[in-house]
Image (cartoon, rainbow, N blue to C red):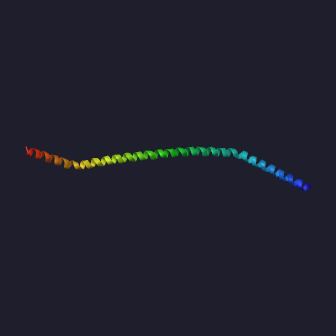
Amino acid sequence: MWIVYISISIVIVAVILLITSILKTLKTTRPTINSINHTMGSMQAKMNAVSREADQLKTIQGELQEDLNRKKRSMMFTVEEAKRTPKVVKDLANGIKEGHQSS
């Protein structure tokens, strides 16, 4: 019977040592875990800032593209009108000649 009591005592001591070891490990790793959590929070904040900046850049890029397209259309219109100018001047000159000849 003494063997049973000794075995139970050994198991109880082993459990106590295990719990003590776990608590000591938790106590020593807690600062490291807190530091890692702090670093991860800081990294997350920086990633969020980068993401916001990327969204702003996309918006600005879209606005610049629209502005460029608008200016391109305006330039194309100006070029087309400039190409028509010699014909308009010629037609105007012919109209003036015909008006003077009929008087």
Residue lying furthest front: 102
Picture layout, residue 100 above or below residue 11: above
Image point (82%, 52%), residue name: 14
Q: Nearer the viewer, residue 42 or 82?
A: 82
Name the spot of residue 94 as percent of width and height, x first. 14, 48
Name the spot of residue 57 as percent of width and height, x first. 46, 45
Image point (90%, 56%), residue name: 3
Name the spot of residue 28 as percent of width and height, x first. 72, 46
The N terminus: image quadrant: bottom right
Name the spot of residue 100 as percent of width and height, x first. 9, 44
Q: Nearer the viewer, residue 35 or 15?
A: 15
The C terminus: image quadrant: top left
Q: Nearer the viewer, residue 29 or 80?
A: 80
Picture layout, residue 3 above or below residue 27: below
Image point (30%, 47%), residue name: 75
User: Seen in the image, is 101 located left or right of residue 45?
Assistant: left
